[in-house]
Amino acid sequence: MNDLSVANTATRKAFDVHAIRRDFPILSQQVNGKPLVYLDNGASAQKPTAVLDAMDRYYREMHSNVHRGAHTLGDRATTAFEGARETVRSFLNAPSTQEIIWTRGTTEAINLVANGLAPRLNAGDEILVSCMEHHANIVPWQMIAERTGAKVVPIQVTPEGELDLDSFNSLLNDRTRVLAITHVSNVLGTINPVVNMVKQAKARGIITLLDGAQAVPHFQPDVQALGCDFYVFSAHKLFGPTGIGVLYGKAALLEEMPPYQGGGEMIERVSFAGTTWNTLPYKFEAGTPAIAEAVGLGAAIDYVSRLDRKAMEAAENALLERANRLIETVPGMSVIGTAKLKVPVMSFKIEGLHPSDIGTLLDQQGIAIRTGHHCAMPLMDFYGVPGTARASFAFYNTLDEVDQLFTALQKIQRLFA
């Protein structure tokens, strides 16, 4: 046992990662004849049996449409569906389930907000985003800006991968109407100082949105403590199913916003003389919702909530610390993003190697990572690279898997050197 293993023995005992891994069936398989080492959690995390069982049970025992059926299955489905909404409300510490809107994911949630705020925007107004945003928190605002005459203004990033707060302070002005920033960077892992940024924005009457897609897998946000007007995330990054996400929004703003889509469920009364809208949250939930997926998300949150959060965060920090210590063992390797506060995400490059080649060669050794621009082209432009390789860790990853990653990288580097 080496010194790093000794240093992390306490973490292993406090957080039984091997027991947890047994809850995730997909992790036990082999890929290309090697045990799977799944390090692409930032793109989509794996699902515990509790989530798979909850969705299976819904389809086997209670499938029906919600809110409409005057029968037992309809009641069961509605109870499970609305129970999941309450689980999300509690997870976010939102004041009311009326403020929890189901969406298809983070992307749709941001599009919903952007379109809903369009009537508030005029020519010359400014929308602040940052240079580290995912495209999902840039493009919708650009589309609304083009429609309204507003302007999207980027907050700069430091070479270390932190938001440039001097840039942020200088950009706040009387024309700023919206601040939309990521809570955690999907490329850099940076945890942004959103509480203070939101506080400054709110002091000027600026509407605030936080993209929590990369935050919720690693820590539990409190929207009341954050003070933001909107908070968005996707279930599949939180160990839940694909195809569903959440928009938290303050009720007063949601009441003012027009519906994003029209159809069933979001109406109160329809006639050819005119239509009136349903109450919150249903005003923004047109059509049959993703019922099984909502149930799955509720099960995912219940699963994560049963874990020792402090021990989980300590285990994840140990993974990142181990990775950071091993960087120097791979000649020519450098990391992009060295912020002081990070979740366990490591974007890197190796001199002389294309990121896609690194990803392909790692896959041959059973190791799954992400390569490319990570839907963050402005950030790639800032660093002057076409893309990076990215290893993103979750609480079910082990220190041994970190070692396997770097052993494989050393092998690849020697091969090409």
Image (cartoon, grey):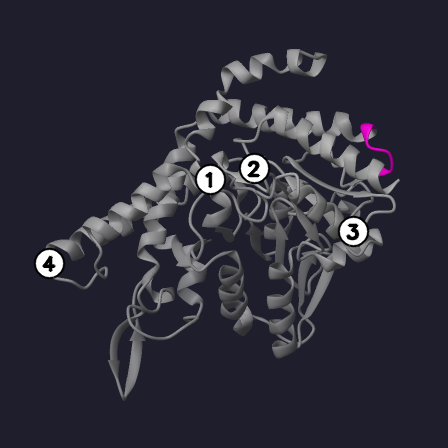
Report the disc number at residue 160: none
Query: Which residue is at a point 56% across and 17% down the rendered structure image?
Result: 11
CA gap between label 1 and label 2 equals: 9 Å
Query: Is residue 86 a member of the stretch shown in magenta?
Result: no
Whether 56 is drawn above or below 176: the answer is: above
Crowd rating for badge 2 (residues with CA inside 10 Å; few <14, some 14–19, many 20+): some
Based on the picture, tell me whether residue 330 belongs to the magenta stretch: yes
Q: Position of residue 314 (x, y in %)?
A: 58, 23
Q: CA distance from mark 3 to mark 4?
A: 58 Å
Considering only order in the chain, which callout, 4 or 3, is on the residue closer to the N terminus? 4
As helix, strand or loop, the secondary structure at mark 4 comes to loop
Query: What distance separates the C-alpha of mark 1 from that of mark 4?
Result: 37 Å
Q: Which residues are magenta?
A: 329-333
**Inter-mark Cα distance, 3 to 1:** 44 Å
The alpha-carbon separation of the residues under discs 3 and 2 comes to 43 Å
Q: Which residue is mark 4?
A: 71
Between circles 3 and 4, the one closer to the viewer is: 4
Q: Which residue is mark 1?
A: 26
Residue at the front extreme, as displayed: 33
Q: Residue at x 35, y 69 (%)?
A: 286
Could you tell me if the residues under marks 1 and 2 are in contact, i.e. CB atoms within 8 Å? yes
Q: Is there any visible trace of residue 169 in the rendered image? A: no
Q: Secondary structure at mark 2?
A: loop
Q: Nearer the viewer, residue 255 or 86?
A: 86
The local crowd at label 1, few if under 14, some if 14 to 19, many if 20 or more residues have their Cα within 10 Å, is some
Spot occupied by residue 239 in the image (x, y as percentages of width and height)? 46, 42
Magenta stretch mostly in which secondary structure?
loop
In front: label 3 or label 1: 1
Dot placed on the residue nearer the N-terminal end, 2 or 4 = 2
Question: What number is the disc on residue 36?
Answer: 2
Residue type, numbered disc 3: Ser
